[in-house]
Image (cartoon, rainbow, N blue to C red):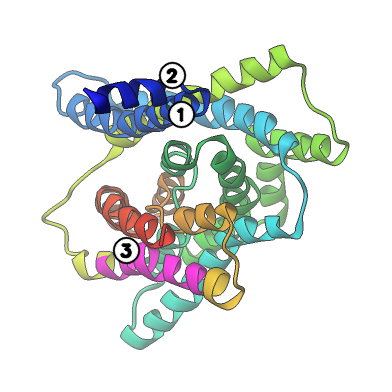
């Protein structure tokens, strides 16, 4: 009885009440990740269900939710040298992938298409579709400010520039600088990212009503993104690419977060929440959009699908490990 009264007293306390509600909100977001992921897996196995609906979901997330989140969070970020840490994650990861798989390619005599496939799919993490819901569930709005930096000036810009160059070169083509620049300039998330950065620089923000609207648009990203991922997950057990899949996931899920952790935490002695989020984002599964890019250039489409299909489920295990390490 005493414990019951003590619990009732704590629950009625404003600070405890806020903490309790906050934890319930994060738990709710985390549950949403799995609910909609498995819902997507179930729907893709229902006969007659239009699985291609994921393309519509991707469009909504990329053209509406991501810009809304950028416009909501980036103007509120306080500028500091520490921002370079989350921004640098994607650039370090992709550069490392290029060096790692170029070395293995020369050692084992891999084809250009295989090498290009692994550089792109293992070199880019799912920092938005998968990363945003997980970071929001674990770190809340403060974590989302960092996640936006990892994704927008990081993963997104790398995807739109270096990844396109690699995809073109390794598919026996020549990169067209003008086409690359055009793709970047007219891409809505990139445009809104620039607008949000300008607002941050000028110390401007939207009216409360507009901020509320942007926040509500951004909130639907979690269920839509995870439903899209679930609809696209494919498991090809008969594939001949198992060894290459192992190399790809070894780099993306294990080596990448190890390098970021050692560089940021051990060598540079950084221990803030921003660094925690940066490390967690570095451990995310391969990016779906990167897989689509590589596949569309004829760079081992089956292996691209396997990197996503096996990378996402396995990443939940490695992410749990890294979250535990970061709490020590």
SS type, badge 2: helix
Q: Is residue 251 magenta?
A: yes
SS type, badge 3: helix
Dominant SS type (magenta): helix
Q: Label 1, label 2: how many angstroms apart (C-alpha)? A: 7 Å
Does 241 sit above or below residue 284? below
Q: Is residue 256 visible?
A: yes
- Residue carrying label 1: 16
Q: Residue at x 33, y 59 (%)?
A: 300
- Residue carrying label 3: 249
SS type, badge 1: helix
Q: Is residue 60 visible?
A: no
Q: Label 2, label 3: how many angstroms apart (C-alpha)? A: 47 Å
Classed neighbour count for the residue bearing mark 1: other residues with Cα under 10 Å, few (<14), some (14–19), many (≥20)? few
Q: Residue at x 69, y 59 (%)?
A: 82
Could you tell me if the residues under marks 1 and 2 are in contact, i.e. CB atoms within 8 Å? yes
Q: Which residues are magenta?
A: 246-262
Count of numbered circles in the view: 3
Q: Position of residue 212 (x, y in %)?
A: 64, 16
Q: Position of residue 262 (x, y in %)?
A: 50, 74
Q: Residue at x 71, y 49 (%)?
A: 181
Q: Is residue 325 left or right of residue 262?
A: left
Q: Quadrant of the C terminus?
A: bottom left
Q: Is residue 269 magenta?
A: no
Does 109 sit above or below residue 208? below
**Viewer-nearest residue: 177 or 313:** 313
Q: Is residue 91 left or right of residue 171?
A: right
Q: Label 1, label 3: how many angstroms apart (C-alpha)? A: 41 Å
| Circle on res. 301 | none
Does 263 sit above or below residue 282? below
Q: Is residue 84 left or right of residue 231?
A: right
- Residue carrying label 2: 12
């Amino acid at each position: 009885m005493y414990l019951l009264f003590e619990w009732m007293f704590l629950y009625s306390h404003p600070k405890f009440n806020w903490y309790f509600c906050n934890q319930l909100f994060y738990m709710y977001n985390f549950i949403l990740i799995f609910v909609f992921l498995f819902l997507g897996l179930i729907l893709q196995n229902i006969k007659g269900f239009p699985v291609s609906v994921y393309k519509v979901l991707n469009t909504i997330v990329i053209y509406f939710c991501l810009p809304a989140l950028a416009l909501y969070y980036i103007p509120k970020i306080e500028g500091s040298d520490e921002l370079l840490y989350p921004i640098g994650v994607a650039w370090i990861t992709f550069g490392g992938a290029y060096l790692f798989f170029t070395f293995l390619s020369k050692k084992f005599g891999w084809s250009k298409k295989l090498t290009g496939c692994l550089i792109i799919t293992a070199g880019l993490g799912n920092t938005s579709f998968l990363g945003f819901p997980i970071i929001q569930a674990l770190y809340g709005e403060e974590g989302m400010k960092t996640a936006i930096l990892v994704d927008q000036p990081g993963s997104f810009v790398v995807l739109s520039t270096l990844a396109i160059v690699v995809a073109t070169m390794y598919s026996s083509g020549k990169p067209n600088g003008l086409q690359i620049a055009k793709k970047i300039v007219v891409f809505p998330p990139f445009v809104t990212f620039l607008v949000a950065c300008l607002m941050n620089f000028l110390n401007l923000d939207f009216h409360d009503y507009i901020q509320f609207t942007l926040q509500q648009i951004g909130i639907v990203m979690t269920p839509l993104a995870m439903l899209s991922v679930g609809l696209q997950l494919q498991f090809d057990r008969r594939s001949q690419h198992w060894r290459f899949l192992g190399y790809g996931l070894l780099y993306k899920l294990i080596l990448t977060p190890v390098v970021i952790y050692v560089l940021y935490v051990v060598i540079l002695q950084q221990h803030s929440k921003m660094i925690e989020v940066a490390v967690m984002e570095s451990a995310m599964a391969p990016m779906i959009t990167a897989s689509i890019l590589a596949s569309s250039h004829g760079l081992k489409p089956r292996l691209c699908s396997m990197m996503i299909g096996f990378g996402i489920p396995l990443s939940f295990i490695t992410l749990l490990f890294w979250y535990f390490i970061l709490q020590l």
